[in-house]
Image (cartoon, rainbow, N blue to C red):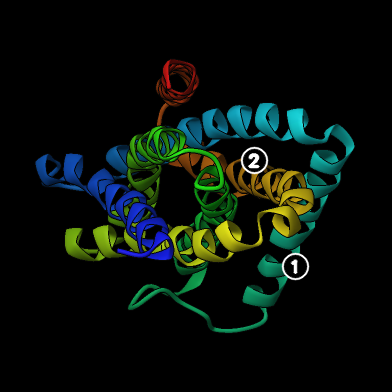
Amino acid sequence: MSPAGYVFAYGMITAVATALGALPFVFVRQISPRVAAASNAIASGLMLGACFGLVAEGSELGTWQTGVGGLLGVLFILATQRALARTDAGFGQVRGAGGRKMILIVVVMTVHSIAEGVAIGASFAGSMTLATMITVAIAVHNVPEGLAITAVLRPQGVGLASCAWWSFFSSLPQPLVAVPAFFFVDAFAPALPYGIGFAAGAMVFMVLVELLPEAYEDGQRGTVGLLVSLSLIAMVAFQRVL
């Protein structure tokens, strides 16, 4: 297999790993408002935990560049919200606020995957051992991201197979971006902190304006706060181990 083939294959592994995040919902038979609130709370904690890691990683590459990227991410979500509000956009059969929220989660997580694709491609510019370590770390990290996506989609009536597909879809930029990043690593490197900051800003803002308000509306405040805190801590600890 050619070097580009290896890069693409490793990137595809990380995309497939994201789909595994749908598996825990095999055991959730009934999606009541309380389960929906818990799902949104867990998704919020996982996304916020991922953002801590993103900001730390981006700051090592460029502090103010990461900050600028974060601001652009917030503006992106605001612009996307306004654009969706002017249309009858929906996600499958789901319309209204629920459909718009589902579109946002898929868009945000897909954009977030671009930076990870660059990381995979850039790692191949080093050694095969480094590339394997980076790929395994991102693949394992992607499983809870798939869980976060499914936690938002499943309570809206999306089937498990579709949740797994959209989780996989959100990580498709990883194999697609990894190959050009491998060939043009020097050109991609300066843009990486902006991309990382963009993903973090977009994710934090979406959690604050979309996921958490709905979680508090449908669930008990104490339970929601506990689930957000525990999932956030778990995600941060998970990234530290990796």
Q: Which residue is drawn at 61% across and 48% down?
A: 206
Q: From the viewer's perspective, is 70 left or right of 233?
A: right
Q: What residue is drawn where x is 35% and y is 47%? A: 146
Specify the label residue 204 is tagged with.
2
Closer to us: 181 or 167 = 181
At label 1, counting other C-alpha atoms closer than 10 Å, the crowd grade (few under 14, some 14-19, many 20 or more) is few
Dot 2 surroundings within 10 Å: few (below 14), some, or many (20 or more)? many
The Cα atoms of the two marked residues, 2 and 1, are separated by: 15 Å
Measured from the top left, where is residue 96 in percent x and y? Answer: 49, 71
Quarter placement of the N terminus:
bottom left
On the picture, is 59 further left or further right than 117? right
Q: Which amino acid does label 2 sit on?
A: Val
**Secondary structure under the numbered disc 1 in the rendered image:** helix
Q: Position of residue 91 (x, y in %)?
A: 41, 73
* Residue type indicated by callout 1: Ala
Task: Say whether marks 2 and 1 touch (CB < 8 Å).
Answer: no
Residue that lies at the very extreme toward the bottom in this rendered image:
87
Direction from residue 182 to residue 199 in the image, left or right: right
Which residue, as the protein is rendered here, is positioned at the far right? 64
Vertical order, 38 against 21 (above or below): above
Q: Which residue is drawn at 73% across and 53% down?
A: 186
Quarter-wise, where is residue 170 in the image?
A: bottom left
Counting from the top left corner in percent of width and height, residue 153 is at 35, 57
In the rendered image, which residue does mark 1 sit on? 79
Q: Which of 113 and 48 is in front in this view?
A: 113
* Residue at 68% from the left image edge and 26% from the top image edge: 56
